[in-house]
Amino acid sequence: MSVLENEKRVNLASLSIDELEKMAQVRRPKPVPSNLERSNYELPEEYRDVSRGKRYYIRTYGCQMNEHDTEMMSGLLEGMGYQQAGEIESADVILFNTCAVRENAEDKVFGEIGRLRPLKVQNPELILGLCGCMAQEKGVQKFVLDKFPWVDVVFGTHNIHRLPELVMTAKNSQDTILEVWDKAAATVEDIPKVRKQETRAWVNIQYGCNKFCTYCIVPYTRGAERSRMPEDIVQEVSQLAAQGYKEITLLGQNVNDYGVDLGTVTFAKLLRLVNDVKGIERIRFTTSNPWNFTDELIDAIAECEHVVEHIHLPVQSGNNEVLKKMNRTHTREYYLSLVDKIRHKIPGVSLTTDIIVGFPGETDEQFEDTLSLVAQVKYDNAFTFIYSPRENTPAAKFEDGVSQETKKQRLQRLNELQYAVSLERNQTMQGQVVDVLVEGPSKTNQEVLAGRTRTNKLVLFEGPLELSGGLAQVAVTEPQTWLLKGELVSRHKEALV
Ligand code: SAH
Ligand code: SF4
Ligand code: F3S
């Protein structure tokens, strides 16, 4: 694999990590000073409590960023007086916060919107809205206007804070209200949030993505990379600590590029700032791109007491030709040496990844490279996907002679390998005593408590309900592929104060 670098062909596979890192500085989009305005949100007085007694329901698809956007939409609607509905049928406002990353996610949403038509017929006052990443797609906007005229409002990822106005306008209009901005006009701070969980909270640190991997729609649906100001982030984390949250997850599509646009701060520095906030026990972050994963960042993760030993490091493929066609900017060799470096400096680190199989033209041999990389890295877990062509992305135009059947078989082989590796990794924990941040009764079995290790492994164990929201020490007695079963050794809530 090679790239043109200053008129000269460079063989990436032959370069050392340091040389690759130097190139990263050259090849990365130039830092653009973020001249976006920063504004503080305030719910306009005329919308406060106007919908008292009414109910809302939001169905969320996609990634953590969407889940967090839903928390903001809930905050805005509750500011208007809406309360959360127990089930979709009893809601006066229904929002679909959508994901566009793969086709099947989109199909599901269209199916659901179709099924809601009778509700709209029963209750003409019902406001039905489509938002999130699908709403940013021109094709989807047109499709909704043509095929689902009972949708009242369509808005995008850049104008969530406009929700109160949009709901009120939709209420008074017979037409579908369409308000989708192509890009963010400002970084809007202080949007109210109704958080879904009581122990763990999401914190946005960066919006958008500049990477333009050839298969991916996210740069088009979320716009250019923008970092939040470090002081705003630290302030939000301090408030969360004061409210009793124990864990935060810093969110961005490429968190290790955090601050590139600001020019005054790096992600490593941000981790150190957040680590100093008293009361927060665990700091997670997602997603970090393998590219530009600097030594400064590895050291910060290793040295910051509250930053956990878990890195989600999406590789996508183990073959250099495929990686190049994906515009992933890392090579197999760079990735493997990065993994070595991380494992050396962060003992006990858990690594997870995302992998796409059946990228256009992927050969059997190229797929085998992915299998061998998975066997070599020994991920704790992997999220695996069959490539899904996305409209207007470069890869959608690449030639692809590989049948869907072959792609499905590849996915199955990959999953079987990963399940075996996950079990093997978990079995090494047999007998270990782990710190578990207890979330509460397990969703699948109310008799046991569920929580997570610092490395993000799910642990189930018997214990008193009042442990919820605190730390406990649990001995691993029965490691399985997806979770660890264990026995309570001691509660040590005092560690949190
Ligand atoms: N910013 C993250 C990824 C966000 S999207 C990163 O770069 O690591 C989450 C995952 O969805 C990706 O890592 C990729 O594995 C998968 N994905 C994205 N586009 C896809 C497509 N067109 N088909 C199949 N999977 C896709
Ligand atoms: Fe998509 Fe690549 Fe950006 Fe991740 S880094 S969001 S995969 S374009
Ligand atoms: Fe997330 Fe899906 Fe959008 S993965 S950023 S909700 S396209």
Image (cartoon, grey):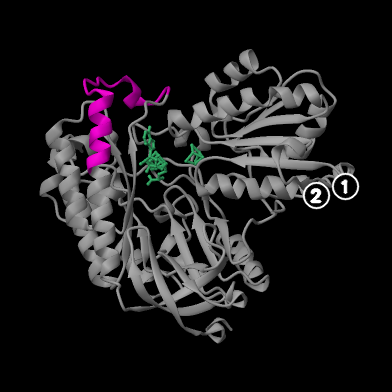
Is residue 273 in view? no
Kindly identify which numbered label has been placed on residue 49. Answer: 1
Look at the picture and state if 65 lies above or below 399.
below
Secondary structure found at label 1 = loop
Viewer-nearest residue: 44 or 199: 199
Q: Is residue 481 magenta?
A: no
Residue in the picture at 80% in, 24% down:
122
Q: Which residue is the site of mark 2?
A: 79
Viewer-nearest residue: 203 or 230: 203
Tell me residue 460's x, y (percent).
46, 68
Tell me residue 377's x, y (percent).
21, 57
Q: Which residues make up the magenta segment?
A: 391-413
Tell me residue 135's x, y (percent).
58, 29
The disc, 1 or 2, on the residue closer to the chain's N-terminal end is 1
Q: Main secondary structure of the magenta part?
A: helix
Residue in the picture at 48% in, 32% down:
105
Picture quadrant of ligand 2: top left
Name the image quarter holding the C terminus. Answer: bottom right
Circle 1/circle 2 CB separation < 8 Å: yes
Q: Is residue 392 magenta?
A: yes
Q: Quadrant of residue 392?
A: top left
What's the distance in space between the residues labelled 1 and 2, CA to CA? 6 Å
Amino acid type shown at disc 1: Asp
Q: Is residue 426 left or right of residue 218?
A: left
